[in-house]
Image (tube, rainbow, N blue to C red):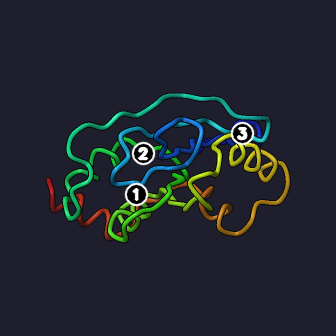
Amino acid sequence: MTTEKGQIRMKIAFTTSDRIHINAHFGWAKEIDVYEITDKGYQFLETLKFEGDLKEDGNEDKITPKLDALVDCTIVYVLAIGGSAAARLIKKGVTPVKAKSEEEEIADVLNKLVQTLKGNPPPWLRKALQPKTATFLDEVEDEATV
């Protein structure tokens, strides 16, 4: 998330199978649409595509490319997500949010977020908007991998 002259600018991602609804499980999603959003509106940026056997439960490796691809996003909306994947996203500073149903439309969520950014964002969104900072534990893990 970046700010320009007081304007909030962030990337939001959606797991989708039809590019209209938030209707895909995070681990199984073959496509994740990414948008940039401000208090003035939103625009589509890209569709991230993932290959392979994504329905295999317990295969944590399938999640790693998604985590890496989403690292500059503030929020990812999902139909469902496993506990370990959610924890790994949060550790990277990305907030996972479950859709109300697989009928919830991406455009509706984006429009609500634009309106929310114009007003007073709720506490969970203010926290998600805070700059990402490395924790001591992250720094120790980074040193261990060198």
Count neighbours of disc 3 (C-alpha within 10 A) and say few if under 14, some if 14 to 19, many if 20 or more: many
Left or right of 109 on screen, residue 98: left
Q: Of residues 34 and 9, which is closer to you in this image?
A: 34
| Total number of numbered discs in the rendering | 3
Give the residue at x 19% y 59%.
59
Out of 117 and 4, give the one closest to the viewer.
117
User: Which residue is denoted by mark 1 in the rendering?
Assistant: 92
Callout 1 crowding tier (Cα within 10 Å): few <14, some 14–19, many ≥20: many
Q: Which mark is residue 20?
A: none
Q: Are marks 3 and 2 in contact (CB under 8 Å)?
A: no
Where residue 21 appears, as percent x and y from the top left, is 58, 44
Q: Which residue is mark 3?
A: 38
Q: Amino acid at mark 2?
A: Leu
Q: Earlier in the sequence, mark 1 or mark 2?
A: 2
Q: Position of residue 69 (x, y in %)?
A: 37, 41
| The residue positioned farthest toward the front in the image shown | 103
Q: Position of residue 137 (x, y in %)?
A: 31, 70
Q: Quadrant of residue 91?
A: bottom left
Numbered badge on residue 70: 2
Q: Amino acid at mark 1?
A: Lys
The quarter in which the N terminus is drawn is top right
What residue type is disc 3 on? Thr
> Is label 1 in a helix, a strand or a loop?
loop
